[in-house]
Image (cartoon, helix red, strand yellow):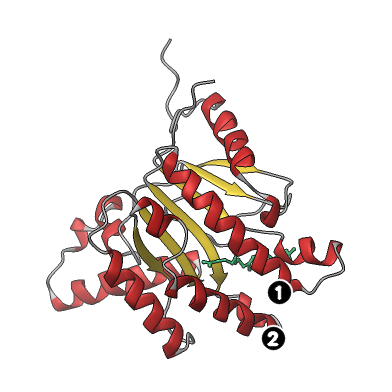
Amino acid sequence: MEYKIPNHVAIIMDGNGRWAQQRGLKRTKGHEKGADALKKVSEYVYKKGVKVLSVFAFSTENWKRDKEEVNYLMNLFLTAFKKNFGAVKKEGVKVIFSGIPDKLSDKVLNAMHKMTEETKDNENGIFNICINYGGQDEIVNATKKIAKEVKKGTLEIDDINQDMYNKYLFNELPPIDLLIRTSGEMRISNFMLWQAAYAEFYFADTLWPDFDEKEFDKALEEYTKRDRRFGAIKKK
Ligand code: FPP
């Protein structure tokens, strides 16, 4: 089957904890396997021709988890970023981060900064990693930046529109075409609310550590069948 290839794919990588619990393992083991899955899947996604991949690695709400789990995740990010992992090295993609830097340790921030610097000239795609990210936060943050400009007199109220709003978000990204959530949950959970306005949603029952190339193909197959009208009526 010839797949239609989405330009921007976003993934809510859910189910790491349950994957581990089902096996009588610690939740952190699920995150370790989740990182392996991301490495493999990200490489495949760009190989298929997708240009932008956004992943939800840590939400503003995830700080509420046990300290041990939060620390484990932060160390996992640190190790992964130090290694320029997965698609970054193999596919030559540019890494960017979305989220609020507050609360992240200097160690993690430095590794993020280094990875952004080292990959800034890569042109084969964009890997947007969302850490300490919330979609409503992103919109509020953009609104504040816009309001400040209006107050300063560098922007007119009438010049505020959907296209320019994009420039004030954490990163200027194209709209999401396909949004995948694993583990059977059917929620958006405050992920990329602005960018997901017309996204096609694909929910997989598979837990994130088990999500692989075949599973991604299933998502592409489903996406290919969808009739995207963007609010218009289909022309015959
Ligand atoms: C959700 O599963 C997953 C997370 C909160 C962490 C996602 C992180 C990774 C996949 C690690 C790799 C990331 C990078 C960028 C190296 P959950 O723990 O909420 O699962 P549950 O709902 O079964 O408890």
The answer to whether residue 23 is left or right of residue 172 is: right
Looking at the rendered structure, which numbered label has been put on residue 68? 2
Taking the image in four quarters, ligand 1 sits in the one at: bottom right
Q: Residue at x 68, y 44 (%)?
A: 204
Q: Residue at x 47, y 88 (%)?
A: 105
Q: Amino acid at mark 2?
A: Glu
Instruction: State yes or no: Cβ of the residue under disc 2 lies below 8 Å from any atom of ligand 1.
Output: no
Rendering coords of residue 13 (x, y %) = 61, 58
User: Which callout, 2 or 1, points at the residue further toward the start of the chain?
Assistant: 1
Looking at the rendered structure, which numbered label has been put on residue 28? 1
The image quadrant that residue 49 belongs to is top left
Q: Nearer the viewer, residue 123 or 155?
A: 123
Answer whether labels 2 and 1 touch (C-beta < 8 Å). Answer: yes
Residue extending farthest to the left is 154
* Quarter of the image with the N terminus in it: top right
Binning the other alpha carbons within 10 Å of mark 2 as few (below 14), some (14 to 19) or many (20 upward) gives few
Q: Amino acid at mark 1?
A: Thr
* Quarter of the image with the C terminus in it: top left
The image quadrant that residue 120 belongs to is bottom left
Label 2, secondary structure: give it. Answer: helix
Binning the other alpha carbons within 10 Å of mark 1 as few (below 14), some (14 to 19) or many (20 upward) gives many
The answer to whether residue 204 is left or right of residue 136 is: right
* Residue 193 visible to the viewer: no
